[in-house]
Amino acid sequence: MASSSAILPCNLKLRSSFTPSVSLQHYQQRKCGLRPSTHGLRVVRASAAPAVVSTSPTGVVLVDRSDAEKVHRLKTAYLEKAVPLLKEEFSYTNIHEVPKIEKIVVNCGIGDAAQNSKGLEAAMKDLSLITGQRPVKTKARQSIAGFKLREGSTVGIAVTLRGNLMYSFLDRLINLGLPRTRDFQGVNPNSFDGHGNYSIGMREQSVFPEIRFDALGKPRGMDVCITTTAKTDNEAQKLLSLLGMPFRQGVSTAPLVRKKKLKAVHFDSKKSKGRK
């Protein structure tokens, strides 16, 4: 006869004697979603241990083995681990002030889309496999004779991800795509636009496991634009760091000072002075 402890779930604890037939009926009722009858059986649920947030020396929240089995583990990690740390560091008084990822836009430019219709369909198929959503065709806004471009012609494809698809793609980008990039040393922390949005450029789509390397034709790259609700770049960088974005170490995050471009008037004045 099997022991009674092997019949009940692991999170249940008994404090009285019982027969195996009663315990089996009790387990079947719980499994079917019915309210189990006690029959003199006292069931006490074991208390859960408090969750411990583990972080690396760089401040990245580490993913536990139990979290790796969850479907939307990155979204769960943001709600349970990243939000309390952000609220404590930046002293947010309201939970709605905590920055979050609003959307992710993935676009791929195809210059020969007008002449190669099969290549356009292949690119759309590959991008739909990577993102899980069918892309849309982007059209040219104006005609440019130097590039042999007409207004309304297809120049690329784009996908806008939100919700669970967004977190799923970001999870695969951070944990699969970027580490498989050739000579990868981290992403550039200076790629923020000043409003909390971050952009990543990838040279090859073959780093994703959904794309077979033998079936890949012409290598294509893509741009990933992560839009957040953060007001500053510092808050956005901290948010992405807690989600696991591997920023390059030893790079100064100070804003770059760009030189002011000289107009044609300055060059004309210099020429005129030299002639005199």
Image (cartoon, rainbow, N blue to C red):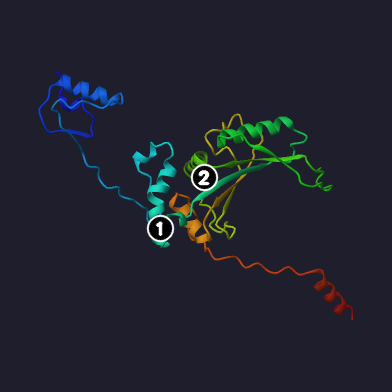
The quarter of the rendered structure image containing the C terminus is bottom right
Is 22 left or right of 171, judged from the image as shown? left
Q: CA distance from mark 1 to mark 2?
A: 28 Å
> What secondary structure is found at the residue carrying circle 2?
loop
Question: Camera-side residue: 106 or 176?
Answer: 106
Above or below residue 125? Residue 20 is above
Dot 1 or dot 2: first in sequence order is: 1
Check the image and name the residue furthest to the bottom.
276
Above or below residue 93? Residue 140 is above
Q: Which residue is mark 2?
A: 178
Query: Which residue is pictured at 23% across the width and 32% down the height?
Result: 10
**Where's residue 236, x and y in %?**
50, 56
Q: Which residue is mark 1?
A: 87
Location of residue 124 by image quarter = top right
Above or below residue 221? Residue 261 is below
One can see residue 148 in this view: yes
Check the image and name the residue furthest to the left.
17
Location of residue 38 by image quarter = top left
Question: Camera-side residue: 240 or 266?
Answer: 240
The mark closer to the camera, 1 or 2, is 1
> What secondary structure is found at the residue carrying circle 1?
helix
Is 36 left or right of 83, judged from the image as shown? left
Query: Which residue is pictured at 21% across the width and 39% down the height?
Result: 46
User: 10 Å neighbourhood of mark 2: few (<14), some, or many (≥20)?
Assistant: some
Q: Amino acid at mark 2?
A: Leu
Q: Amino acid at mark 1?
A: Lys
**Where's residue 191, x and y in %?**
58, 56
